[in-house]
Image (cartoon, rainbow, N blue to C red):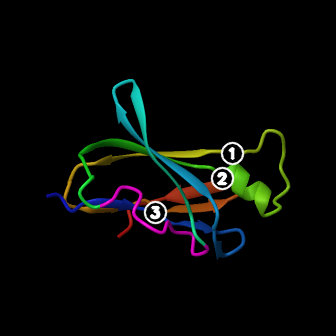
Amino acid sequence: MTQGYLTTHVLDTASGQPAGGMAISLYRLEGENRTKLAQVSTNTDGRTDTPILPKGECVPGTYELVFETGAYLDRIGVPAEEPRFLDHIPIRFGISDKEAHYHVPLLLSPFGFSTYRGS
């Protein structure tokens, strides 16, 4: 049985706070096919309550997390231009080791973001 799994967290660098209540979708990509595997939301600590891809479900391949940043920024009162500069942030990444923990965090501001492979 594999033990790899996927987690994330979101930090709002403009406010210096975790980004709670942000919706996130996980997709698996295979050629032109895009399959939705999960829909989660961050808690008050900016993390999901459980792994997005639980232990035992980690399969090598290409994945994409889509962070619903526009709805989050609207909810916390960040004035929106039309259209909002960062409404949805997709992060495409590969899982090569089915036994590993993959952590893909998002650092967010209304006009920029960054990510990295965390631990």
**What kind of element bears circle 2?**
helix
x 63%, y 68%: residue: 20
Q: Earlier in the sequence, mark 2 or mark 3?
A: 3
- Three-letter code for the amino acid on which mark 2 is drawn: Thr
On screen, 30 above or below 90? above
Alpha carbon separation for disc pair 2 and 3: 14 Å
Q: Residue 29's spot in the image, x, y percent?
A: 37, 35
Q: Residue 96's spot in the image, x, y percent?
A: 23, 49
Relative to 113, 94 lies left or right: left
Question: Does residue 110 appear anywhere in the picture?
Answer: no
Q: Earlier in the sequence, mark 3 or mark 1?
A: 3
Quadrant where the N terminus sits is bottom left
Name the residue carrying label 1.
Answer: 87
The majority secondary structure of the magenta stretch comes to loop
Quadrant where the C terminus sits is bottom left
Q: Bounds of the magenta span?
A: 44-54
Name the residue carrying label 2.
Answer: 69
Tell me, yes or no, whether the two marked residues, 2 and 3, touch with CB atoms within 8 Å.
Answer: no
- Three-letter code for the amino acid on which mark 3 is drawn: Thr
Label 1 Cα crowd, 10 Å radius (few <14 / some 14-19 / many 20+): some
Relative to 45, 60 lies left or right: left
Q: Residue 100's spot in the image, x, y percent?
A: 23, 62
**What kind of element bears circle 3?**
loop
Name the residue carrying label 3.
Answer: 8
Q: Where residue 10 is drawn, which disc sits there?
A: none
Tell me, yes or no, whether the two marked residues, 3 and 1, touch with CB atoms within 8 Å.
Answer: no
Tell me, yes or no, whether the two marked residues, 2 and 1, touch with CB atoms within 8 Å.
Answer: yes
Q: Earlier in the sequence, mark 2 or mark 1?
A: 2
Label 3 Cα crowd, 10 Å radius (few <14 / some 14-19 / many 20+): many
x 71%, y 50%: residue: 70
- Three-letter code for the amino acid on which mark 1 is drawn: Asp
- Toward which corner of the image does residue 75 lie, by quadrant? bottom right
